[in-house]
Image (tube, coloured by chain):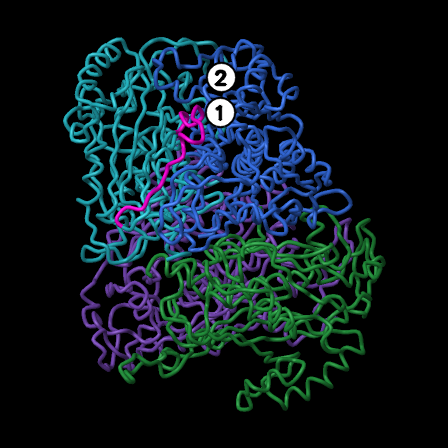
Chain colours: A green, B purple, C cyan, D blue
Amino acid sequence: MAGNTFGTLFRYTTWGESHGPAIGVVVDGVPPGLALDEADIQTWLDKRRPGSSRFTTQRREADQVKILSGTFEGKTTGTPISLMIENTDVRSKDYDAIEDAFRPGHADYTYFKKYGIRDHRGGGRASARETAARVAASGIARKILGESIAIRGALVQIGPHKVAPARWDWDAVAANPFFCPDPVMAKEWESYLDAIRKSGNSVGAVIQIEAEGVPAGLGEPVYDRLDADLAKALMSINAAKGVEIGAGFEAAALLGDANADEMRMENGNATFLSNHAGGVLGGIATGQPIVARFAVKPTSSIAIPRKSVDRSGSDVDIATKGRHDPCVGIRAVPVGEAMMANVLADHLLRHKAQCG
Amino acid sequence: MAGNTFGTLFRYTTWGESHGPAIGVVVDGVPPGLALDEADIQTWLDKRRPGSSRFTTQRREADQVKILSGTFEGKTTGTPISLMIENTDVRSKDYDAIEDAFRPGHADYTYFKKYGIRDHRGGGRASARETAARVAASGIARKILGESIAIRGALVQIGPHKVAPARWDWDAVAANPFFCPDPVMAKEWESYLDAIRKSGNSVGAVIQIEAEGVPAGLGEPVYDRLDADLAKALMSINAAKGVEIGAGFEAAALLGDANADEMRMENGNATFLSNHAGGVLGGIATGQPIVARFAVKPTSSIAIPRKSVDRSGSDVDIATKGRHDPCVGIRAVPVGEAMMANVLADHLLRHKAQCG
Amino acid sequence: MAGNTFGTLFRYTTWGESHGPAIGVVVDGVPPGLALDEADIQTWLDKRRPGSSRFTTQRREADQVKILSGTFEGKTTGTPISLMIENTDVRSKDYDAIEDAFRPGHADYTYFKKYGIRDHRGGGRASARETAARVAASGIARKILGESIAIRGALVQIGPHKVAPARWDWDAVAANPFFCPDPVMAKEWESYLDAIRKSGNSVGAVIQIEAEGVPAGLGEPVYDRLDADLAKALMSINAAKGVEIGAGFEAAALLGDANADEMRMENGNATFLSNHAGGVLGGIATGQPIVARFAVKPTSSIAIPRKSVDRSGSDVDIATKGRHDPCVGIRAVPVGEAMMANVLADHLLRHKAQCG
Amino acid sequence: MAGNTFGTLFRYTTWGESHGPAIGVVVDGVPPGLALDEADIQTWLDKRRPGSSRFTTQRREADQVKILSGTFEGKTTGTPISLMIENTDVRSKDYDAIEDAFRPGHADYTYFKKYGIRDHRGGGRASARETAARVAASGIARKILGESIAIRGALVQIGPHKVAPARWDWDAVAANPFFCPDPVMAKEWESYLDAIRKSGNSVGAVIQIEAEGVPAGLGEPVYDRLDADLAKALMSINAAKGVEIGAGFEAAALLGDANADEMRMENGNATFLSNHAGGVLGGIATGQPIVARFAVKPTSSIAIPRKSVDRSGSDVDIATKGRHDPCVGIRAVPVGEAMMANVLADHLLRHKAQCG
């Protein structure tokens, strides 16, 4: 069944394969009258673009977005906004060697089992290239959210190496190729990741996304809770294997009196004294910052040979050449930010519809 | 916006408050001709029922389910199945003391901010009582899944105390009041939790849910992936703060060659040599067991006073009396199993619709 | 696939069979803080109730509605509202004679072909009894619409006998058992319908529904147009075979200059000089009254023998006893009003979400 | 709220304005492995293409479709299929005269009231140009339906002039510029429509669409009935004002014994002796041909001056130049066929999901 649409009121559908002529997204439900041009979207695509350092895939895509509909004289019209990004640096020959074999840990196998089709060129629809379309949609989502809601993300762990909370500096994030908020750790990652890259291996990571300025009330329990929709959104990112809100798995080890975010009146406002909840209680935003983390596994396309099978049912050993990210977690940072924006824009409209 | 419906093809809507006359669920999209009577549903409700040991709330509910529609002569007719459970042991007076104050860490505050209404009696709609309706729905979901898909869950951590993988014994789960697969740890939890209960405190937990026999191919990328829908389903359970599939957050620390689930032909079938993926690749089931975990925070209703505020904007200290679970994680086990069943039933029908 | 839910933001799901223990509806997405008690819903059920004259079925149902959830202290809470109506006057024995045979023109045959199940008792889910649940939902829809939107309906044709536009008097509608706005025609219908009833036959009808005070702007093109959703809503009523908006099929015979609803400024407002459009242009409300009509076929359960077949594949002649409406069009008037209310409430919230 | 998506399992979203760079559609949920190339879609676009006779708009569009995703080596892959048609013959200057004024009977006014935006160029999103995207989608729908389901349409009325049932000849439809099944009436229409065209006026029409070979069982009551979804689909076509199934409004004048479609066994199959139902009973297909009709109003863009108002609130008289269809009903025939195909493809998958 159709599964390529995200959101309900801010609703978008992505399309396109890694090695097709283009990828794109149609965004429906956008309020009219918002100022929007291609630069508003391009800025987020540029942040995600591959090839920006030696730690990401060497595929060179301009990722130039075109607006094909839904705006008039620089403003949204309320009708569907169609965005398209042409694929330019496609090298399908790299994939001839794996035309019949399945990469262990890759969606190759499951797409074939599900659809009976093997589009071996660059992962086809399962490629992380699809995330460019999500990021493009988020350029519109952020227009809906407005200036008062700020979303930012950071890479907080690569392999076993975690950033130190005491050294956390949001300004550092833009100053290294890892979106790392800890300048000391960024240095360590550089040599660590160089070694992994040279050995043809890959490594996992954890990404943290925060949103400030989210008004209390967003979220639609009991199923379309804000945290449940965030969990789905972040788990839908390629390679994601886990999602946490606030204290997350650490909450399992806490006692009730320690976990409770106590409240006091401050300047006439109810104010929380801590944020173990990560900004969500009962599936509804508290008004505190939304804090989410997600883990991504190591890239499955590696140059180290692994045992596998092929379409004809023979055992094979497979090593992937192509051009791949040694740590997909790096480029997952802007993608995670995008999904946070897409979820919040949807919930802002949903809350307005019923309770606005 | 309406948010009380789960699923697309196996689709159900729950209703009811903790202290209203009844709770219930309407299940639509059920294939016709399935044998179904009340006992098929009651068996799962009995597993979740409160008051079964001193470690769960002392509220005594018979949780007797009635089928009001959708069956004829013991078989499903393909029309909506309405299930109702009457509330019998309601003691709203327990809650008079908190009529105006917000329990820290509870949905009290956010429901009030969202809806402008304060139904203080037992948590209203935010109460875990709603999970009985999900469990009832899962009785039908399991009929759709059939005998070849087996779902089971276990509590794997309470506070800092984790079960030992080496001692894991599925048969032990039914032999202690914690759904604990480790008989040694079950004993430790007993004294640990007794102490917490007596101190009026509470504690978090981690639950693991597995599904065996799930056919390869289930899952609808790129958004309605099987793992993304599981993440949403499990995060929608009361008190959930984190969800993992397979290796989960541990995958962040792994290298690509270690994480790859290698494959070999065995007796003519492609067979995985490990299951870091937790049975899902690219959002699609691999055919291996689906393995998911979720963390729940400590119950927010505790007898230890916490700082809070009330509706009139005054600082208050609040301690909750009522009858509460010292560890909601225990009863979250059958609820997690239920959500696994509900997700799989939906995806079984979804896959059949497009690829069957 | 699940098909018993109507609406998107004002969203309800109905359940129940004609001869089951009860029927009901769960309404989700209702704004919080609306005054609502059972009397607000009962008033519309009473208008639709069977057995109120000799021209409708003699089944006597109290149709007493209970609110099971979603309100607190007389106000909506924003959570799902569950409404239940018990079936009391069930006489399933009447249907024993048709246990195996299919009534020509009835859904008997198609439900059996679709689901493989034959619930012969009173039509099962296909019975017009389901419409009580829609009418109940409309009691809530009208609360959302508020006092400024007025919905009213009338029966405008029975068999070949149409009301005279020149004699149209809305006040007459409540003064006869037909919801007829033409007192002269109401008299004629009385004798006409008596003859049909006595002969064991039935007859079709046309119903007109109008809504005044609908603000310009409601409707979500290009698919979820206001008129398209009305067409679906009215066609979903039992026995409906046609739907028109404004001039409807008459528009086919008009020239462009005659059909154009010209406009002039009046007291500072753009004002239409006619309403061929029936209040909808391009799928969006113009601000003029919404005018819709739908045709219903004659009741298929008649006492006159008709040729048919049975489950075993034999030819049979069948005459239905039971208690049936000689003209279902009469009771379709409040049902049509209800569906108009349900569509408008949904679109009011939808418009607010994107453009409010 | 987003309203540009049609269908649930066969689900597509259209985008694009009359005078933008392109229009298009993304089709999701398509079963994998279907043979599909651009010619399969082009054939239906060619049938609808403007400028094919003097009775349709003189805008000359090649309407050349491109497949941008979702196929591999000539087969569908199960992933979203993105189709794009570039706009080539755009003459926006024609519309400068109406930049501020609203055409009576056109969506100009309501789009402005809803969205606060005036895209005066060729009707913007409200233009019938959008129907090309629906027709493109139907090329894929027909692949799902397969060879055994045949859909065909005809124009059965222009102004007051109706085809004669006795002269109905499906082979005649392709032999005149009106899709008219009555060769004698086609001649009459030619002179009638020439006179209307020369006078700068327009006229309404009625279109009939039939589908043969539809298996009994399609349709999802009680809301997503096959006839209700058809009513929505056909009413969503530009200028539509009425929809009928089978006997339609004529059913209102029938008695029950005449309307009943009697049944007899023939060669071991239950066979209907008439088809007043138009192939749908209780919202479910009977297995007989599906017969639907819809009425379209006259084109609102006419050269005869009409009274109107403009954005500044002044009275104006307005006559439209541009290039317009004197009878949009002609090109509505392939659009009606397309919507029939789109509805049936969706319901085929829906039925399979629950009952297959």
Magenta segment includes C259: yes
Q: Which residues are magenta?
A: C248-267
Q: Callout 2, which amino acid?
A: Lys
Please, is residue B89 above or below residue A256 in the view?
above
Q: Which residue is mark 1?
A: D206
Q: Residue at x 47, y 9 (%)?
A: C315
Relative height, residue D193 to residue D30 (above, below): above
Tell me: D227 left or right of B58: right
Side of D204 where B164 appears, left or right:
right
SS under mark 1: strand
- Amino acid found under the numbered disc labelled 1: Val
Residue B304 in which image quadrant? bottom left
Q: Which residue is drawn at the image coordinates 24% and 42% (left, top)?
A: C150
Q: In the rendered structure, find residue C332 and report the number of the disc placed on it.
A: none
What residue did someone put label 2 on? D162
For the point 33% across and 69% down, the residue is B110
Q: Residues within 10 Å of mark 2 (few under 14, many from 20)?
A: some
Outermost residue on the left side: it is: C175
Tell which circle, 2 or 1, labels the residue nearer the N-terminal end: 2
Percent position of residue D266, x then y: 55, 10
Q: Position of residue D121 (x, y in %)?
A: 54, 49
Are circles 2 and 1 on residues that touch, CB within 8 Å?
yes
Q: Is residue C122 magenta?
A: no
Q: How many marks?
A: 2
Where is residue B325 drawn, in percent x and y?
A: 34, 68
Q: Percent position (x, y) of residue B60?
A: 28, 59
Q: Is C288 situated left or right of D131 in this image?
A: left
